[in-house]
């Protein structure tokens, strides 16, 4: 599959937690032979630094964001629940987002990229070549998140309810923050993944990119 008409395309993929945007972005980057950036990992790395310093994620993120180094992104403990909660708090801070903004833009401008996050199409790359907003119901996303963490589906209604509550709380935090809230870009193509597997989503996105003349088979 090749890219048509644009030397350095940027594909923006936004959406809430566990909707499937990360899987899509990685697969699409491989398909299009483009670099891939998971911007959520940037905020997790900042949150991890804050927690390691015994700081408050709601207040101490800017300094750690400015000190972020590539090694922070390669840590194996960035997906833990405490980091997930701290990353949401860190991401609400305008100075944190400002510190990471140019880093994200530089990555995409260098050679093009597939970039996923929560404000890529609205703030980071408002002029992206193509924009997608990937979402799913809270129940489906909760089940996916539980499988990611535990390697098996939720085994009881109580477990599922706990995961749904956590997902809804994160959604509320992300959508209500004053700086770069989670929302679809006006020109983003929205895809609901409740009844789609990863291959289905990738096929649909590639079809849309073909129809837009961005890629060809």
Image (spheres, rainbow, N blue to C red):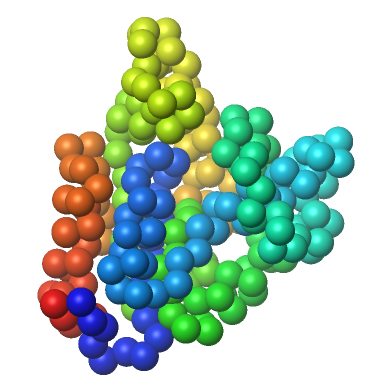
Q: Where is residue 191 in the image (x, y as percent from the top left)?
A: 24, 51
Would residue 59 be seen by someone viewing this image from the given angle?
Answer: no
Nearest to the observer: residue 98 or residue 42: 42
Q: Vertically, is 35 above or below 96?
A: below
Residue drawn at (64%, 55%) of the image: 73
Q: Position of residue 44 (x, y in %)?
A: 63, 47
Point out the image quarter for the C terminus. bottom left
Nearest to the observer: residue 135 or residue 48: 48
Left or right, 97 with respect to 137, comes to right
Q: Vertically, is 58 above or below 30?
A: above
Point out the image quarter for the N terminus. bottom left
Q: Position of residue 110 (x, y in %)?
A: 53, 84
Q: Position of residue 215 (x, y in %)?
A: 21, 79
Q: Vertically, is 156 above or below 38?
A: above
Q: How many labels does the image show?
A: 0
Left or right, 7 with respect to 119, comes to left
Residue drawn at (59%, 46%) of the image: 177
Would residue 169 be seen by someone viewing this image from the given angle?
Answer: yes
Left or right, 115 with respect to 155, comes to right
Q: Quadrant of residue 203?
A: bottom left
Residue drawn at (82%, 47%) of the image: 60
């Amino acid at each position: 599959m090749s890219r048509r008409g644009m030397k350095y395309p940027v594909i923006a993929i936004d959406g809430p937690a566990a909707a499937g945007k990360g899987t899509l972005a990685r697969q699409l980057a491989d398909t299009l032979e483009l670099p891939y950036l998971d911007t959520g990992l940037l905020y997790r790395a900042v949150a991890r630094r804050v927690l390691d310093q015994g700081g408050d994620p709601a207040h101490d993120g800017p300094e750690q964001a400015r000190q972020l180094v590539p090694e922070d992104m390669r840590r194996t403990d960035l997906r833990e629940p405490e980091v997930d909660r701290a990353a949401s708090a860190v991401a609400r801070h305008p100075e944190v987002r400002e510190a990471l903004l140019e880093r994200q833009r530089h990555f995409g401008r260098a050679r093009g990229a597939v970039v996923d996050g929560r404000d890529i199409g609205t703030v980071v790359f408002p002029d992206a070549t193509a924009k997608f907003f990937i979402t799913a119901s809270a129940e489906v996303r909760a089940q996916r998140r539980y499988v990611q963490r535990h390697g098996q589906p939720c085994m009881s209604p109580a477990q599922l309810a706990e995961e749904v509550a956590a997902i809804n709380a994160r959604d509320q935090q992300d959508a209500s923050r004053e700086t770069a809230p989670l929302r679809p870009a006006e020109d983003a193509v929205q895809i609901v993944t409740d009844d789609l597997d990863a291959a289905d989503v990738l096929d649909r996105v590639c079809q849309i990119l073909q129809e837009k003349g961005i890629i060809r088979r």
